[in-house]
Image: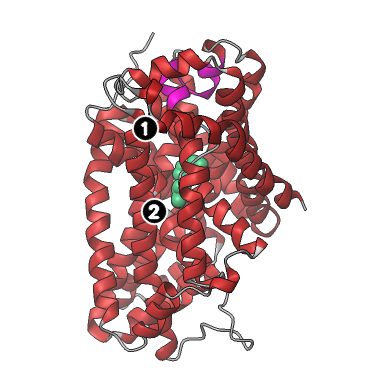
Amino acid sequence: MNKRGEFSSSIGFIMAAAGSAIGLGNIWGFPSQTAKNGGAAFVLVYLILAFIIAYPALMAELIIGRHANSNPVGAFQKIKGGKFFIPAGYLGLLVAGLILSFYAIVAGWMIAYIFEPVFSSLGMEALASWSKSNEISRNLIFTTIFYVLTILIISGGVQKGIEKWSTRLMPALLLIIVSLSIYVMTLDGATEGLRAYLLPDFTRVFEPALLVSAMGQAFFSLSLGVGTMLVYGSYISPKENLSRLGIYVTLADVFIAFLAGLMIIPAIYVAAANGAEIFDEAGNLIEGGTIVFQAIPQLFTSMGIMGMPLSIIFFLLMSIAALTSSISMLEVPVSFAVDNLDKNRNIATWVIGAGFWLISVIIILNFDRLFDFIIDFTTKFSQPLLGLIFCIFIGWVMNRNEILKELEKGFPDARYSMFFKIWRFFVKVITPLLILGVFIHSLV
Ligand code: TRP
């Protein structure tokens, strides 16, 4: 049996789990959703839902994971009453990989945009415009680069791979976001963007579309519903207080999303002030993806000589965020291969990574047919479904005393705490009902 890894410290875990949570979903998804859904009103709803839906579901995964000391399949095999849930564990492994297969394509675009200004400044105009194009060769190459980086980190294991990289990359990320948002504030048009971001239009708070997007965003953003947080939970030392670690991760995720909004929303308005087409004729924001790939590069171009290094930094930031997330996706099936099939970690990582890379290649070759389909299947269908199953398992099937014993390892007063009473009620009733709400909506 291969020895299972463990995070060396709570900081190591927090960095790794926050690195998983913080990704393209925060830095690009959250700001563009905010802009589309009434600015500050969306921010407010998102903050509330992150704590009443995502945090309870996150705790469910962390507790199940550390208690079973295993991956999603192994956890359901080990915990009493879990037999019936094993297929859900397998679905988690598959969905984690499928999320990786589209995420790596988007991350590849980010890497391409790091190189674009480099090529262009070296006078290699053909290569520069190829980097910006949507050609198959360009997508294949940059997606493959992203896979190799992900695989190299994951094959290193928990302390050498995941933890080492996350602890280095996360602070760099924070620094870059803060500096860029301060820089953006000095530009024309930024104040208008700031207003849109921070002054809520309260009439929109209860709009069903806004509620649903905010809920989905919270769910995706905390990496829930595929077993990522369950596996990371299994690497936490028994000494640690899980409820506190969970809160830190939730706070870090929400905080970075908020900061990213502070950088990107004003940047969008600055680009508009510089003549970029940000709004359509009706005055609504153009779709999220277009904003990042048109307005942001235009913003950098308009900066003159400073634009090139800043553009490189910005897309480096996006790539780093994507990498600390993608490693958490690949880790789910890899941990299954290591725990349950007793495979060598290095070999398992390359084989499984190659398998999902092949799926990415198939998606790239059939982009129009498959790309949106895979995103919808994984994020709108599977993630809410599996999140719901984890909540039902811990709320209604798993023995209450077993849960308490697990929590008490690092939190001796858990049994009598407000945390336990409130969380238990949420995970049993409120959170499943709310997730069910998203799920039903996504089917309609
Ligand atoms: N949360 C990450 C983001 O916001 C993406 C992510 C990482 C993820 N691991 C996941 C999403 C597992 C769903 C499931 O970009």
Magenta range:
63-76
Which residue occupies the foreground of this view, 433 or 16?
A: 433
In the figure, residue 343 lies in which quadrant? top left
For the point 60% across and 18% down, the residue is: 397
User: Which residue does the numbered mark 1 point to in the structure image?
Assistant: 243
Q: Position of residue 314 (x, y in %)?
A: 32, 66
Q: Percent from the top left, x then y, of residue 36?
A: 56, 71
Q: Secondary structure at mark 2?
A: helix
Q: Is residue 20 above or below residue 177?
A: above
Q: Give, as a three-letter code, the residue at label 1.
A: Ser
Does residue 183 lie above or below 318 as drawn?
Answer: below
Nearer to the camera, 395 or 168: 395
Dot 2 or dot 1: first in sequence order is 1
* Three-letter amino acid code of the residue under disc 2: Val
Mark 2–mark 1 Cα distance, whole angstroms, equals: 17 Å
Tell me the residue at 33%/52% (across/down). Answer: 320
Horizontal arrangement in the rendering, residue 300 relative to residue 372 (left or right):
left
User: Residue 410 shows which numbered tag?
Assistant: none
Image location of residue 57, percent across then percent down: 51, 36
